[in-house]
Image (spheres, rainbow, N blue to C red):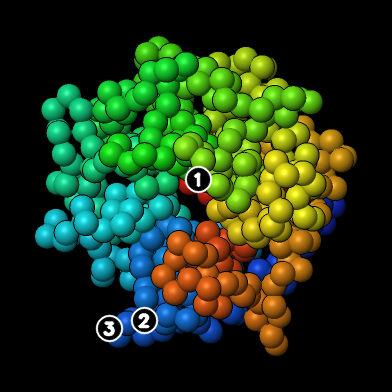
Amino acid sequence: MFRLITLISVVAFLCKCAPPKKTEYLDELESIHQWLNNQKVTIEGSQTWPNATDQPEHVSLSHSDGVAGKLIFYLQLYRETNNDSYLQEATNAADYILANLPQKTDSLHKVFWGFSPYGNVCGSAFALVETYKATADEKYKSGATHVIDVIQHFALNKEDTISWGLGNDVLGGLAGTALFLLYAGENLERPDLIEMAEKAGKTLLSRATKEAGLSWKRGQNGRFELPNFSHGAAGIGYFFARLYETTDSESYLEAALTTNTYLESIAKTEDGVFLIPYGFPDPGWSRPYDVGWAHGPAGVARFYYQLFKVTGDEKWKEREQACLKGIMSSGIPALPSSTDFGEDEFYLDNRFGIGSVASFLLDIEGKNGEDEVFQNELIAKVMSESVMEGNQRYWPQVRYSFMANAGDSTAFTGLFYGAAGYGMLLLKAQAKMNGTDFIRFVDDPY
């Protein structure tokens, strides 16, 4: 009995001496939760979140703007807090997705981003797989399997090649769908899905422009080439590097390296930076170079970090650092420091702007003191643009020119432009401090 009491005392002492879990951002995250909770609408008897406050009737399942993205925010918030109420928010969202799953009878080929990992189909399946991993509830695995059946049902050219349309890119096209298939194949132990991803790779190789390396148009019948991560060669090269990681087939590594050859041929590399032009043919883009995940080095660096992961060659880590140096040369978060980055202020969000750059700074390894200061400056800028009303925090925004109701003011709820996305940025910082596993999307190598 004495030994047992002594052991308990020692354990209690060690627990008291263990460093407490850091909670630096939890108050801010709770205020984001309070705002999201206040935005819920009732759709056919179920409560969930609209994509934005100015269109409360518009609810999507998507990862980028819709229910799936908010679900991931709450799963990560639960990881950081062990607060069961946040897990309940996530499972409520998963149940909403289950009740509104994509079906084989839907006209999905006509839906914008129909099979994008950021859209309603793959995005909802990703959220259900992550919910299954968190809860071990088989209904979420079954829901994800149903969505995968829908994806397979709509596949075109199912023999040696495969596609779901003419899009090639990560954000809305074939490379993105294939990245989801790799994720699902690995997490659900489905080798048939990895075989589908390989067929997608063959399709992309057949669609490539083979001049000075490999490059792709965003859409096969389009005229624009946007070579950065979300719409072009950097993202597709990343897919090939991931495909090599999964299959060990040297042909995919060769495809990734040949894509790099193209990127090097168009890159600005003076003064140690690595910057890829916004796009071709240039109809007068407001920024010749950008900074964020979509069109800038915060996204391009993912390709090079993935090459480092699969080859172990330090030159790719150096390229990642050159991407960082390109960002730091821009003047962000202040006004652009040169005409290379246009004249307009940088966007705030997690697709194009400061949020995505801050997220990249949190990801890279071996930060020095200067990088740490830069990271904190970016997060502070993001927080300074929020509005706090009572106990609720949100980010007002004017809709971009490519959106419906362009120019209208709103507040988005999702990952790309809204509260859940800025919350995920804070959660990444929180997870980094505490060594917590962070939920990674299908195009995230870190």
| Amino acid bearing label 3 | Glu
Give the residue drawn at x 62%, y 63%. Answer: 423
Q: Are marks 1 and 2 in contact (CB under 8 Å)?
A: no
Mark closer to the observer (1, 2): 1
Q: Secondary structure at mark 1?
A: loop
State the separation of the CA atoms marked 1 and 2.
36 Å
> Which residue, given by chain and number where applicable, does mark 3 sit on?
44
> Which residue, given by chain and number where applicable, does mark 2 sit on?
57
Q: Position of residue 116 (x, y in %)?
A: 35, 49
| Sequence-earlier tag: 1 or 3 | 3
Give the residue at the far right of this rendering.
Answer: 369
Give the residue drawn at x 55%, y 47%. Answer: 284
Residue 283 is labelled as 1
Quadrant containing the C terminus in the rendered view: top right
In-image side of 32 versus 388 (left or right): left
Q: Position of residue 54 (x, y in %)?
A: 47, 81
- In the image, 209 versus 17, the foreground residue is 209
Residue 345 is labelled as none
- In the image, 117 versus 98, the foreground residue is 117
Callout count: 3
Residue neighbourhood size for the residue with mark 2, other residues' Cα within 10 Å, grouped as few (<14), some (14–19), many (≥20): some
Q: Secondary structure at mark 3?
A: loop
Q: Are marks 1 and 3 in contact (CB under 8 Å)?
A: no
| Amino acid bearing label 2 | Glu
| Up/down of 186 relative to 121, above or below | above
| Sequence-earlier tag: 3 or 2 | 3
In-image side of 343 versus 277 (left or right): right
